[in-house]
Image (tube, rainbow, N blue to C red):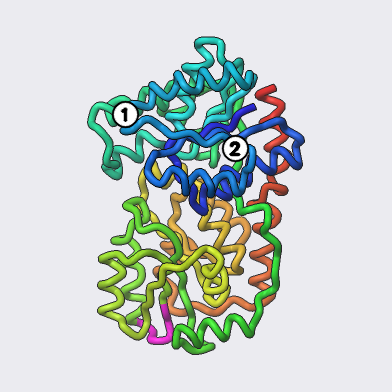
């Protein structure tokens, strides 16, 4: 079995959602699976070393220059399949799935599983992803092909399955829903008050201040204009409300820092350091506009906030998480958060409860049965 990725460089997400999944399937499900990563020639040697450090037997090969020529990589994939003779390809995302389906057409493999990470055609159009116009026009038919002609599917949310049904007429039941999960190395660790105090002192903020954390990308779908609409009244209302952006500098962040110099800070840190700063905060912010891209999403950040013991302030239409938040009382939906005049700091016991929710719902172990169902579908 091959787990195929195309055009994705190593990153924190790649580590937890690709390498960790492959290693988990090997160790816990005893699957005979091997990662095949087709990546850009840019910094190829460094990227290959990073991937093989986590998956030593991974095959890492360069993609042809310019992503629009992805079809030519299908020939290379077909040749690799001739040598390795896998029966199954699990293909992460639309382009990888279409490559795998092309190889299946020429008898290179028997089964293709489409690992759907979101509504890619919608994302490209809603957020003006910079690709060739010809490819942007084609992406919807490629996504439809991946959804309808794969033998099995992984969806990151039930909302994504509903989107497939409405948009592409998907009517089969050959899919499993597995949300984006934390790394298998995740363990519950009680909040360390000394570390929390040390990080707050490093930020220059007080023990009783209420800290809101925003951690992650500043890409278009993160909806910074909507975030600002929430934060400005909040920061004006109470000088003890503070916001920590664990993200790259961005125009909206710079403006907030300028308008609230004592209440807003921004830092771009390594993944290992981010956890300690998140643990020192009181709430995690996950606010995104109402688009198809966001409605079907499964942001890893939701689980990462809960793993740090942070209730999540989140949009109402974000994947399957609004209902989860309401059912498990693990955060505040945005409409309710806007009305709040006072945010109380979560207790140590409450933080531990949120961490246990992650262990029970957003780890590989918690989704063990779904992985079993997946392997039964493709075998």
Q: Is residue 55 magenta?
A: no
Residue 173 seen in render: no
User: Label 2 near label 1: C-beta < 8 Å?
Assistant: no
State left or right for residue 74 relative to residue 372: left
> In the image, residue 15 lies at what x, y percent?
56, 49
Quarter of the image for the C terminus: give it.
top right
On the image, numbered disc 2 is attached to which residue? 58
Please determine whether, in this image, residue 150 is positioned above or below residue 105.
below
> In the image, residue 308 lies at what x, y percent?
59, 67
Q: Residue at x 32, y 81 (%)?
A: 236
- In the displayed orientation, state which residue is furthest to the left: 133
Q: Dot 2, crowdedness within 10 Å: few (<14), some or many (≥20)?
A: many
Residue 99 seen in render: yes
Please determine whether, in this image, residue 80 is positioned above or below residue 59.
above
Q: Residue at x 44, y 34 (%)?
A: 62
State left or right for residue 351 relative to residue 294: right
Task: Give the CA separation, mark 1 to mark 2.
Answer: 25 Å
Which sits earlier in the primary sequence, circle 1 or circle 2?
2
- In the displayed orientation, state which residue is furthest to the top: 106
Please determine whether, in this image, residue 317 is positioned above or below residue 94.
below
> In the image, residue 12 lies at what x, y percent?
52, 54
Quarter of the image for the N terminus: give it.
top right
**Over which residues does the magenta segment extend?**
237-242
Q: Secondary structure at mark 2?
A: loop
Could you say which disc has been placed on residue 68 in the image? 1
């Amino acid at each position: 079995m091959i787990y195929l990725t195309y055009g994705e460089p190593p990153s924190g997400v790649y580590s937890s959602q690709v390498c960790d999944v492959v290693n988990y399937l090997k160790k816990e499900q005893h699957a005979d699976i091997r990662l095949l990563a087709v990546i850009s020639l840019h910094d190829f040697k460094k990227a290959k070393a990073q991937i093989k450090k986590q998956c030593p037997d991974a095959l890492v090969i360069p993609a042809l220059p310019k992503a629009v020529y992805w079809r030519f990589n299908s020939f290379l994939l077909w040749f690799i399949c001739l040598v390795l003779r896998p029966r199954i390809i699990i293909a992460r995302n639309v382009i990888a799935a279409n490559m795998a389906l092309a190889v299946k057409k020429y008898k290179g493999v028997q089964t293709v599983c489409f690992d759907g990470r979101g509504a890619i055609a919608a994302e490209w159009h809603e957020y003006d992803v910079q690709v060739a116009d010809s490819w942007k026009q084609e992406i919807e038919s490629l996504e439809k092909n991946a959804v309808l002609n794969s033998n099995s599917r992984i969806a990151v949310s039930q909302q994504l399955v509903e989107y497939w049904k409405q948009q592409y007429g998907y009517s089969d039941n050959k899919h499993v829903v597995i949300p984006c999960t934390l790394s298998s190395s995740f363990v519950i660790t009680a909040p360390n008050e000394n570390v929390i105090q040390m990080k707050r002192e490093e930020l220059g903020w007080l023990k009783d201040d209420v800290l809101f954390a925003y951690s992650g990308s500043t890409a278009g779908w993160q909806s910074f204009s909507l975030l600002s609409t929430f934060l400005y009244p909040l920061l004006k209302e109470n000088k003890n409300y503070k916001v920590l952006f664990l993200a790259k500098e961005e125009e909206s962040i710079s403006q907030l820092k300028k308008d609230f110099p004592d209440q807003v800070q921004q830092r771009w840190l390594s993944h290992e350091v981010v956890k300690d700063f998140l643990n020192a905060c009181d709430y995690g912010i996950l606010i995104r506009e109402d688009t198809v891209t966001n409605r079907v999403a499964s942001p890893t950040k939701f689980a990462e906030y809960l793993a740090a013991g942070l209730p999540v302030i989140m949009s109402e239409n974000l994947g399957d998480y609004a209902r989860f938040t309401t059912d498990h009382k693990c955060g505040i939906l945005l409409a309710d958060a806007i009305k709040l005049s006072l945010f109380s700091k979560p207790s140590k016991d409450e933080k531990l409860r949120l961490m246990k929710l992650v262990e029970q719902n957003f780890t590989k172990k918690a989704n063990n049965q779904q992985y079993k169902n997946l392997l039964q579908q493709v075998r």
